[in-house]
Image (cartoon, rainbow, N blue to C red):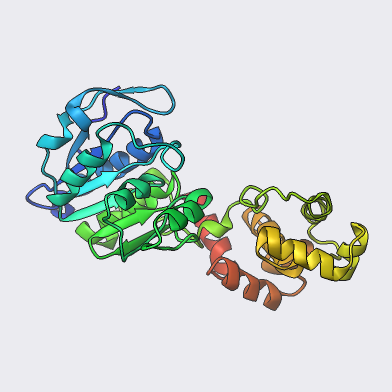
Amino acid sequence: MSLSPRPSPHLSPRSRPHPHPRLAVLAYDGVRLLDVAAPLEVFGTAGGYELVLCSPGGGPVTASTGTGLAVQADASTVRADTVLIPGSPTLPNAPLPAGLLAAAAALAAGARRVASVCTGAFVLAEAGLLDGRRATTHWRHAAALARRYPRITVEPDAIYVRDGHLTTSAGVSAGIDLSLALVEQDLGPQAAREVARDLVVFMQRPGGQSQFSVPARTPRPRHDALRTALEAVAADPGADHAAPLLAARVGLSVRQLTRLFRAQLDTTPAGYVETVRVEAARALLEAGESVAGAARRSGLGSDETLRRAFLRQLGVLPSQYAARFRNSAVE
């Protein structure tokens, strides 16, 4: 499989940078395919970039899907304006692939701008490039990044974080958000907006990583009663889940249940219930429900309660979230 630059028919030549800046994407064995392909698609659609897919040593690599990628250059020979380090499912839990750290460090040393997608942040962190800086990565691995590299200020809810010449992004598809932000930095908001419309994606995605499934990002509780409580909330977010009722349902005192939530989930029963209800309200808004209807059916009750919960957890108003979702459906 070959990923190479292509001219874009969608943007006028006037909107393209000149001279053509080189953007290098570093591929390696086990790399996540979408982390490579999505940024290349964004920059290729924008036009005006010289795109180079390179690898440590210059040989072909095999992505985590088993897909073979034919690269164009040995990373040690490449000098690029912008360097992008994709992630891999193995990076948080295994040694870095051979030659990856040296290749990434060499590319970064000569670049004006360096970015990572998803767990590619672990490569930048290992190279010491994120020390003293803010960064993000896939929500599933944010805590591990913070523990392993305490000199980094990890922002687990961000879609992407720019700190100086370094930009890191959240998981997988967030590479599109990051790439659009870099295109906007180079070519301006109109050019980035045209790319987003062509690819039928958000120009600026509403909210952060907290918008993604609550059960999926909640560690599995060790205590049976806590698991039962979580299942009850997930099964019917709109029901009455006041702490006394929830505790009685699982045979614990309110104090015991609260202690379990704190110890295993780092939240309170009320906090968890609100998070699940926000997720339910989000799904209702995506399905076309009104703000008032989403508030009522999710169990949050009033428009004002829904508004405060959305701002607290997602950083966006319910009406804005609904409008952006509708807009993305028709573009």
Residue that protrudes farthest toward the bottom in the picture:
304
Q: Residue 70, located in which quarter of the rendered image?
A: top left
Name the spot of residue 99 as percent of width and height, x first.
24, 34
Q: Is residue 84 left or right of residue 289?
A: left
Task: Say which of 191 and 73 sits in front.
Answer: 73
Name the spot of residue 24 as percent of width and height, x first.
20, 41
Residue 304 visible to an observer of this rendering:
yes
Q: Is residue 200 left or right of residue 316?
A: left
Q: Is residue 31 left or right of residue 102?
A: right
Q: Residue at x 86, y 65 (%)?
A: 240
Name the spot of residue 213 as percent of width and height, x first.
63, 51
Q: Residue at x 39, y 56 (%)?
A: 149
Residue that protrudes farthest toward the left in the picture:
19
Q: Residue at x 63, y 47 (%)?
A: 216
Q: Is residue 74 left or right of residue 216?
A: left
Query: Residue 36, relative to residue 194: is it above or below?
Result: above
